[in-house]
Image: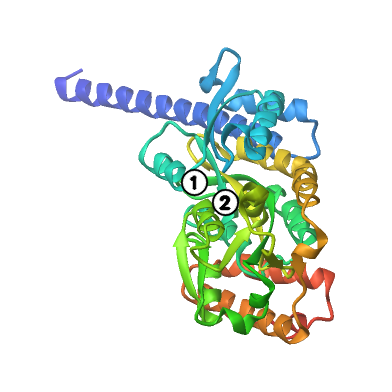
Amino acid sequence: MNIKASVALILCIFTHSLISTSHAAQSSSSIKDQQQAKLESTVMNQNLTLEKRVKALKSLLKDEIIDGSIQRTFCVWDPLGKAGPVTAAADDQVLRSLHYGMALTIETFQNENELIERFLDEKSCDAILVSGAAALQFNGFMGTIDAVGAYPELKHLQLLAQVLAKPEMAPRLANEKYTVLGLATLGSTNLYMENTELSSLDSIKGKDVAVNRHDLGAIALIKALGGTPKEHGLMAAVQSFADHEVPLVVSPSIGYLVLGNGQFDKEVVANKLPLAQSTVQLIGRSQRFPVGLAQLLREDFLFKFNNYAKRVDKELAHIPANFWINSTESDITTLKNLLIDVRVELRDEGFYDATMLRLARKIRCRFEPGHSECTNPVE
């Protein structure tokens, strides 16, 4: 055999070897992909037992397991600090997460902005529990839940929570950087006034109104009513009201519950008609919470939703009935129309998510199918 023929034979053998190796690698890779897909499907299957789903999850995350558990750090915002109700709920989560093979560490922050800055600048928090208004910057779909008038009552939010826990909703709840791991109620958001003389909508004109700087809907609504929004962090906004720096404040129920004990004058009242339902949402880093782990956490939040709601109701029960002021029919009609206008405006400006607003309308119409927006929708 001459040299030329020998080289050709060697090249042929070498090429065949490469092809065989490539096929073997592709086959191995294909089997591995199929195994992973099967495990992911198992975790997402709500018809299977939790034990089977957790076992599959641990197989998927086996490289991250330390001392038998998936270890994560949750940083939570609680205006009352470590003694507050949000921290207590987070501590409950530590025990419950053991069922999912997770070992949680909880860190509490009283300043929400400080917590968010920490999350954005550092990697020490795998997930943060923040107000729904603040969540808008991480996930527009979920952040729109707290849109003014979108979910008027707790029953609307309860139905939404059930929808969001469905596995098919997972793509809406995550992006490349962040994934939403659950939500809970903070009660309704209302307009608080220093006395009954400010109970009409007309009385807001020309007045300063303290608002949470993250609540774009409340800011736009106060402007539409002729007031001047004074933007603060949530608790700073309520404190400015308690200190008589402003005559009105827009706040979730928790704001009153935290500072209302002895800090407000006896003349303080609140408009009974909610401006929104306020939530807290758990936002995680997508790399730290793959789809399966995120799904189990969202289902767990749904399981506890009513329990958290009862905690809020228990605290609200201490507020006397005459604290809540009923609006006139004329003011109610005006306010409801303004809430729609604000939602549409912020949707068109790209702040509120159009899909969430449509979902909210469908849920509202589920309870009130005869409402005009159900036959002539603008959202």
Other-residue count near label 2 (Cα within 10 Å), few / some / many at <14 / 14–19 / ≥20: many
Residue that carries the numbered disc 1 in the rendered image: 112
Residue that carries the numbered disc 2 in the rendered image: 131
- Measuring from the top left, give residue 235's x and y in whole percent: 53, 51
Total labels: the figure holds: 2
Residue contact at pointers 2 and 1, CB within 8 angstroms: yes
Q: Secondary structure at mark 2?
A: strand
- Measuring from the top left, give residue 291's x and y in whole percent: 59, 40
Can residue 78 be seen? yes
Residue closest to the far front: 266
Is 253 on the left-hand or right-hand side of 225?
right
Mark 2: amino acid: Ser
Q: Quadrant of residue 278?
A: bottom right
In the figure, 101 relative to 340: above or below?
above
In the figure, 137 relative to 104: above or below?
below
- Cα separation, mark 2 vs mark 1, equals 8 Å
Identify the residue shown where x is 44% and y is 48%: 113
Q: Secondary structure at mark 1?
A: helix
- In the picture, the quarter occupied by the N terminus is top left
- In the picture, the quarter occupied by the C terminus is bottom right
In the figure, 299 relative to 51: above or below?
below
Q: Which mark is residue 241?
A: none
Other-residue count near label 1 (Cα within 10 Å), few / some / many at <14 / 14–19 / ≥20: many
Mark 1: amino acid: Glu
Identify the residue shown where x is 80% and y is 57%: 320
Identify the residue shown where x is 72% and y is 38%: 300
Q: Nearer the viewer, residue 238 or 145?
A: 238
- Measuring from the top left, give residue 358's x and y in whole percent: 66, 71
